[in-house]
Amino acid sequence: MSKVTTSSLQKFKQEGRKITALTAYDASFAGAFDAEGIDVLLVGDSLGMVLQGHNDTLPVTVADIAYHTRCVHRGIERALLIADMPFMSYATPEQTLQNAALLMQAGANMVKVEGGEWLLPSVTMLTERGIPVCGHLGLTPQSVHVFGGFKVQGRDEDNSQRILREAKALQAAGAQLLVLECIPASLAKLITDCLSIPVIGIGAGKDTDGQILVMHDVLGISSGYIPRFSKNYLQQSGDIRAAIRCYIDEVTRGSFPAAEHTFN
Ligand code: KIV
C-alpha cells in the first residue's frame, strides 16, 4: 500500500483512473476510509456545518482545521490529506503562508483555497515554498453571502468563461489539484480536458478526473437535507465500510455521479 502523493494523482489523471475522495474529520472514520482505499481525504471547513452545526462555513477557524487535521493524520496511512484553509485565513499572502504552514505542520499534505484571480500570488508563494495547493472554483461556500445562497455557478457565458480562465490561471500559478463545485457538467468537462492537473468534482458531473463528497452525506447523517448532487450509500449497504466501498467502486467505474446528481 503506497502513500498517495501529488505525483500519484497526476499519474491517475494520465491513466484515466478516477480519483476517489471524501471529507473526514477524525481518526476513526478517516482510518476506515483509508483502509477501504480512498485516495484523498479532505479536512473540509464543511466541519462548521456537519460537526459544529452552523448554517455555513464562515465561523470555522485555523485552530479548528488544525485540530481535525491532526486527528485525521493520526488515523491514516495511504490517502493524501488535504486541509481546507478557512474563511479569512488567506486574505493576504503573508497570512496565507503563516496559516498554511500551521496546517502542514498538523499533518496535511496539501492545502485547499477557494477563489480565482485574486489568489494567484498566494498560490505561487505557497508552491514556491513547498506547500502544495488545491484550488476550489464554482460554488465556493465561503462566498455564500456574495452568491446569495448555495447556488449552482457558471450557468451563463460570462461566468463560465471566468471559471475556465481562473482554472487555467490557478494551474499556471502552481496549483496541483482543483476542486470544481456545483457547476454544469459540460463546463466541468471542458475545464478537466483543458487542464493538465487533476480536477475533482462535487456536483460537477461525471467527466472530472475524480469525485469528492462530504462523508455525512454519503452516510446519510447530515442534519438538514442531502444535496441533490450527493448520494446516501449507507441506505443501500449493510454498514459504513460497505457504503464507502460502494462509493469508491461507483466513482471508479464512472457510475457515480448519475444524471440525477448532475447540473446541466
Ligand atoms: O469543505 C468541504 O468539505 C469542501 C468539499 C465540499 C469540497 O470544500
Image (tube, rainbow, N blue to C red):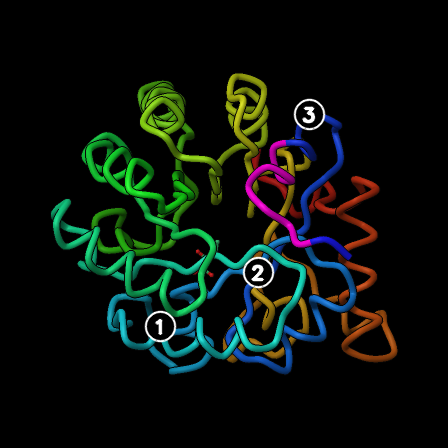
Asked whether the beta carbons under mark 1 and mark 3 sit within 8 Å of each other, the answer is no
| Separation (CA) of disc 3 from disc 2 | 21 Å
Of the pair 110 and 166, the residue shown nearer to us: 110
Q: Quadrant of the N terminus?
A: bottom right
Residue 206 sits in quarter: top right
> Residue 144 placed where, x, y %?
29, 54
Provide the secondary structure element on which disc 2 rests. Answer: strand
**Residue under label 3:** 14
Q: Is residue 153 above or below residue 100?
A: above
Q: Is residue 6 magenta?
A: yes
Asked whether the beta carbons under mark 3 and mark 2 sit within 8 Å of each other, the answer is no
| Separation (CA) of disc 1 from disc 3 | 32 Å
> Residue 14 placed where, x, y %?
68, 25
| Separation (CA) of disc 1 from disc 2 | 14 Å
Provide the secondary structure element on which disc 3 rests. Answer: helix
> Residue 19 placed where, x, y %?
67, 44
The prevailing secondary structure element of the residues shown in magenta is helix
Q: Local crowd at mark 1 within 10 Å, few (<14), some, or many (≥20)?
A: many
Residue at 44% x, 71% y is 69
**Residue under label 1:** 66
Q: Earlier in the sequence, mark 1 or mark 2?
A: 2
Residue type, numbered disc 3: Gln
What residue range appears in magenta?
3-10
